[in-house]
Amino acid sequence: MAGETTRPRDATRWIETSRGILSYTQLAPLLAERVLRVQQRLEAETYADLPLDDELIRRLHGNFCGDLVPDWGGRWRSIEVQVGSHQPPAPHLVPQLMRDYAGNLQARLADPPDPDLMPEHPAYAEGRLLTIHPFRDFNGRLARLWLWEILRRLGLPPVELAPARPPDIESYLTALRACDAGNLRPLSILWLDRLAHTA
């Protein structure tokens, strides 16, 4: 979730992969290459005929990391995780939560969106997904690809989804913590700003 983790900031993360045990620093460029390939497929409308559902979410995750972490890439997490101060739902709840999430999102996007409510749709899509934290890792990358596809289908231009400046990062993390507590408003405001900067 945007780099927020229970590990100390200077701690090294190690992940067992198909290429051996790699530090997160070693793994990051490999992931970046694969994320870019999936993003190019999204731009080419490779997934355009597929419903925006939980199966597409699993497919996207598997497409960018399944060859690196074949034991769990593209599969709902089967372990408890802690993300900062947030305790995502227990793993046995994830499949149903993701079906419900996808159904709710489809209902929100079924009608032509009210321009006044537009920021709420991507805010829900992003915030609820990250609150559930459906995969063992790489949920942030998955969320950005998912949002890219949603924006494309809504006819909206891409927006900056990964804040880089410290104040923006803190605002984003604050908005995500609010989502974890069931309050989408801060993230909706952030999305209003994101969309305004694409006009």
Image: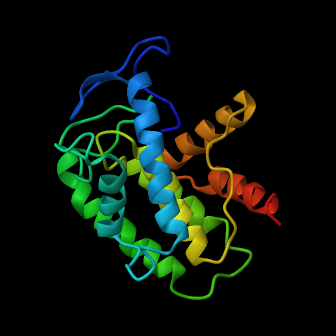
Coloring basis for residues: rainbow
Q: Nearer the viewer, residue 94 or 154?
A: 154
Eyeballing the image, is 73 above or below 111? above
Give coordinates of residue 132: x percent, y percent. Answer: 37, 50
Eyeballing the image, is 183 above or below 112? above
Is residue 126 shown to the viewer in this render?
Answer: yes
Eyeballing the image, is 152 above or below 81? below
Query: In the displayed image of the protein, which residue is found farthest to the top?
Result: 10
Give coordinates of residue 49: x percent, y percent. Answer: 41, 83
| Quadrant where the image shows the C terminus | bottom right
Give coordinates of residue 150: x percent, y percent. Answer: 54, 69
Q: Is residue 166 left or right of residue 87?
A: right
Eyeballing the image, is 137 above or below 185? above
Give coordinates of residue 92: x percent, y percent. Answer: 17, 50
Q: Is residue 120 left or right of residue 149?
A: right
Query: In the displayed image of the protein, which residue is found farthest to the bottom?
Result: 111
Q: How many marks?
A: 0
Is residue 128 shown to the viewer in this render?
Answer: no
- Write the residue at 56% across / 77% down: 153
Q: Is residue 73 left or right of residue 92?
A: right
- Write the residue at 22% across / 52% down: 75
Q: Nearer the viewer, residue 138 or 187?
A: 138
Q: Quadrant of residue 156?
A: bottom right
Q: Is residue 29 left or right of residue 133?
A: right
- Write the residue at 40% across / 45% down: 139
Q: Quadrant of residue 48?
A: bottom left
